[in-house]
């Protein structure tokens, strides 16, 4: 078995970090003697998550541009230039066989550096609407691995391969029963559960919405598993009760999905892929504060296939109660969603991605 060097870059949010980790673990299975280096952004979640999984990571000072006028926007060009120079040094010294980018601030400099130095690059685009950085980098990438059809709008058709999004393989643990999963969270196994997901960082508007409608969940006889995010946890934890369980972050997502009878969630690309794989009916509330409004496009991909309900954030206060009532009281609708989610799922995405990387090697 040959020994290869790979660089993976993806971070900022779980939606970029977890696919990179899923790919890296599959690479390690396929090439046990390989060396894998991560490149992330200093101060972001990948700097803690990646080492916990046993991989080395180097952080770049790159950061995003704020939509509001802030000092960090002035510093952006300097941070970007420094990050690119560091990325060049990393590629020159490390000499990778392939560089894989899954999105996030650090992916831009390291993929661009690799392309300038004529190292093959692969982009894994999770969303149904590609961001500007990936569209630019996609011109020189060898392959673009996507989760949705009709991505020819953004990339050359001959480079695109529909693989689906790589998912952490432990998420659908078949050894866990639904009753076990509910008991794990100290919930009544006999009562239904709706899970609230606001993304790895939490979503204040969704948290506020749930807080204002706890009586509705109680009226419907529903227990709530509520991931409110680290920065919002202290504010909302006082609402925890026998039927309402709050968490800043969920480590055991396998138990989380198994316990859930339905989900109310943001529509980040990886969350969407996990919902498809777990086949859980959902009400999706896209974040309007993301680049290219990609969460809306992700959510509509499910809605157009009759696999989810979509509720835009601007309408949630007035429409949520009716939408939840109609959704929960229509078992036939939710059963149909489950079937359509199964048709949309890509359970072997990580294996497909490794096959593509192997052909490039």
Image (cartoon, rainbow, N blue to C red):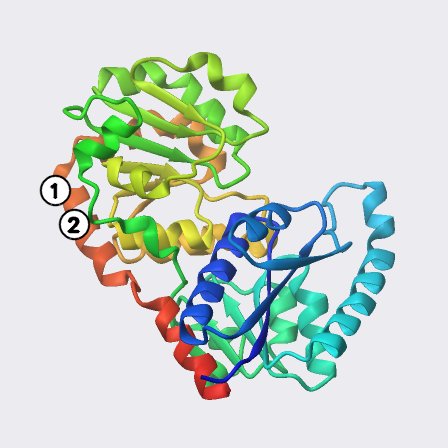
Give the crowd class for mark 1: few <14, some 14-19, many >=20 residues within 10 Å.
few
Please say whether residue 334 is visible from this viewpoint. Answer: yes
Between 319 and 158, the one nearer to me in the picture = 158
Q: Quadrant of residue 134?
A: bottom right
CB-based contact (under 8 Å), mark 1 and mark 2: yes
For image coordinates 75% across by 68% down, the residue present is 87
Question: On residue 179, which mark appears?
Answer: none
Q: Which residue is drawn at the image coordinates 27% and 58% (left, top)?
A: 305
Q: How many marks?
A: 2
| Left or right of 342, for residue 298 | right
Residue 85, image x, y percentages: 83, 69
Which residue corresponds to mark 1? 332
Q: What element carries label 1?
A: helix
Distance from label 1 to label 2 (Cα)?
Answer: 6 Å
Residue 79: x and y in percent read 83, 56
Residue marked by disc 2: 336
Q: Which quadrant of the figure has residue 147?
A: bottom left
Q: Identify the residue shown where x is 41% and y is 62%.
A: 166
Residue at 69% of width from left, 69% of height from top? 110
Q: In this view, does 89 lie to the left or right of 102?
A: right
150 w.r.t. 174: above or below: below
In this view, the residue in front, 233 or 55, is 55
Residue 223 at x, y percent in the picture: 27, 23
């Amino acid at each position: 078995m040959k020994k290869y060097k790979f660089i993976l870059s993806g971070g900022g949010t779980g939606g970029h970090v977890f696919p990179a980790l899923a790919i890296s673990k599959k690479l390690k299975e396929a090439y046990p003697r390989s060396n894998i280096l991560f490149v992330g952004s200093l101060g972001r979640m990948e700097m803690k998550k990646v080492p916990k999984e046993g991989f080395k990571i180097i952080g770049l000072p790159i950061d995003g541009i704020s939509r509001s006028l802030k000092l960090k926007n002035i510093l952006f060009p300097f941070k970007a230039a420094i990050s690119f120079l560091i990325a060049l040094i990393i590629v020159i010294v490390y000499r990778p066989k392939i560089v894989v980018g899954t999105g996030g601030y650090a992916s831009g400099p390291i993929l661009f550096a690799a392309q300038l130095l004529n190292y093959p690059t692969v982009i894994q685009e999770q969303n149904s609407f590609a961001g500007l950085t990936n569209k630019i980098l996609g011109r020189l990438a060898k392959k673009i691995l996507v989760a949705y059809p009709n991505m020819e709008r953004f990339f050359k058709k001959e480079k695109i391969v529909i693989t689906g999004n790589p998912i952490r393989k432990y998420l659908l643990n078949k050894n866990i029963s639904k009753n076990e999963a509910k008991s794990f969270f100290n919930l009544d196994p006999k009562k239904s559960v709706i899970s609230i997901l606001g993304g790895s960082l939490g979503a204040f508007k969704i948290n506020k919405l749930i807080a204002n409608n706890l009586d509705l969940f109680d009226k419907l006889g529903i227990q709530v598993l509520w991931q409110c995010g680290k920065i919002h946890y202290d504010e909302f934890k006082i609402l925890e009760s026998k039927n309402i369980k709050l968490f800043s972050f969920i480590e055991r997502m396998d138990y989380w999905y198994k316990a859930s009878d339905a989900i109310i969630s943001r529509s980040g690309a990886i969350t969407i892929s996990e919902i498809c794989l777990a086949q859980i009916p959902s009400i999706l509330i896209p974040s309007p504060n993301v680049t290219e409004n990609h969460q809306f496009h992700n959510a509509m991909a499910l809605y157009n296939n009759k696999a989810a309900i979509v509720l835009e954030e601007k309408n949630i206060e007035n429409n949520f109660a009716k939408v939840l009532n109609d959704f929960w009281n229509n078992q036939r609708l939710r059963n149909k969603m489950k079937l359509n989610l199964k048709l949309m799922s890509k359970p072997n995405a990580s294996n497909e991605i490794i096959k593509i990387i192997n052909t490039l090697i």
